[in-house]
Image (spheres, rainbow, N blue to C red):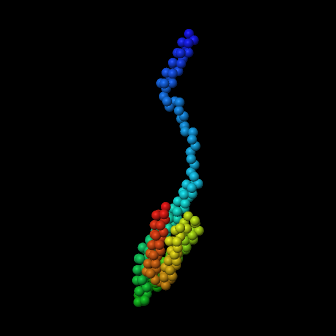
Amino acid sequence: MKLVGTTLLSITLLVVILLSPSTAFSQTRSRSSRQKPSAATANQQRVAQVRTAGATRVAEQIKLLSTFIYVLGGVNSSIAAVDEAVRRKEASPTVEQQNQQSKATVRASIQGFRISLDKLETDFRATPELQPYYIKLAGSAAGAATAEEQAAQSQFERSGRTLLGVINRLTDVLLLMRTTE
């Protein structure tokens, strides 16, 4: 009887093992530890973030300068027309004063661009991740300074053309930043 009971128990256990799904005996969760991002990956992400922030600042300057030059075209025409009327003594003192205010506003705007481009150049030079692009960026503030001098001499059209050169330089920097990722 003992032999029959042991055999019956062994057969029952064998049937239960064979009929139960194999996943019941496997681990339900992987025990291997996840790999943490390496220092190189974290550094690459930081460099990419700094480069993206720098490119965003360059793009913002391009947008602002482009809008300014577009508006400057119309303002320059108005300034030239009023200057001509003043020479012919056909302009009222109020119109002449408004024209002087327009000239001062244009000059102040160009000065603001020069200051912001100076800061941009300084930041690119001082940030290791952006230094490779500084070579292309250098001279942008000098171009804006030239435009500022031209505006001080009431050469607004020339000033606008000089600023177009600055936009070209900024666009070259942005293109370089995009192609060296």
Q: Position of residue 162 (x, y in %)?
A: 46, 78
- The residue most toward the bottom is 88
Q: In the rendered image, which quarter is residue 66 located in?
A: bottom left
Seen in the picture, residue 68 relative to 180 is either above or below; the reply is below
Of residues 53 and 131, which is closer to you in this image? 131
Q: Quadrant of the N terminus?
A: top right
Number of numbered discs overlaid on the protein picture = 0
Residue 4 in the image, given as x and y percentages of width and height: 54, 12
- Whether residue 177 is situated above or below residue 12 in the rendered picture: below
**Position in image of residue 103 (x %, y %):** 48, 80
Residue at the spot 43% in from the left edge and 87% down from the top edge:
86
Q: Residue at x 51, y 62 (%)?
A: 52
Q: Residue at x 54, y 57 (%)?
A: 45
x and y percentages locating residue 32 in the rendered image:
57, 41
As drawn, the residue found furthest toward the top would be 1
Give the quarter of the image for residue 68: bottom left
Residue 118 shows in this picture: yes
Q: Nearer the viewer, residue 107 or 82?
A: 107
Q: Is residue 120 visible?
A: no
At 49% from the left and 61% from the top, the residue drawn is 181
- The extreme front residue here reads 3
